[in-house]
Image (cartoon, helix red, strand yellow):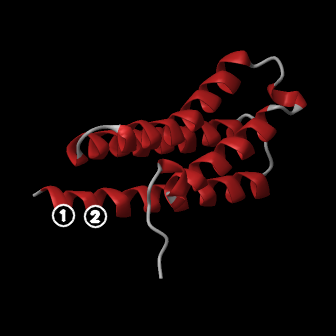
Amino acid sequence: MEKRIETFEDLLVWQKGIELVKQIYILTGQEKFRNDFALRDQIRRAAISISTNIAEGFERSSRKEYLHFLNIAKGSAGEVRSLLRVTIEIGYIDPSTYDHLRNAILELSRYLSNQIRSLKGRIQ
């Protein structure tokens, strides 16, 4: 029997978003990011935006609004992926770290896509 979703904290997609935030904060706390305030802050904000938009949308009064915020979260996941690519291109991270984080973001994007698809089917 599946657990009933009562709060956004019950959502696996939100939980995965929080895990990504933790990984991004650990990564950007490293020496190479210490003085690159713009990149460090932008990738952190984009990562935080994923889980916070899921939460905000869930707390809204309609499925249509929730869908809107899920789409924003998905856009932020793309932003994190793009910024992550910058970090490997400029030598801040190694290929294995890049691959691990990229895979985590792609998985999160798939979860978001599935949630979006599910909601669209219930709205129309």
The residue beneath circle 1 is 121
Label 1 with label 2: CB-CB less than 8 Å: yes
Q: Position of residue 71 (x, y in %)?
A: 33, 44
Q: Position of residue 15 (x, y in %)?
A: 59, 54
The residue beneath circle 2 is 118
Quarter of the image with the C terminus is bottom left
- Identity, as a three-letter code, of the amino acid under mark 2: Ser
The residues tagged by marks 1 and 2 sit, at their Cα atoms, a distance apart of 5 Å
Which sits in the foreground, 79 or 23? 23
- Mark 1 is surrounded, within 10 Å at the Cα level, by few (under 14), some (14 to 19) or many (20 or more) other residues, namely few
Q: Position of residue 96 (x, y in %)?
A: 78, 58
Compared to residue 105, the image places residue 80 above or below, namely above
Compared to residue 30, the image places residue 98 above or below, namely below
Which sits in the foreground, 88 or 15? 15
Write the residue at 47% across / 44% down. Answer: 78
- Identity, as a three-letter code, of the amino acid under mark 1: Gly
Left or right for 103, reference 5? right
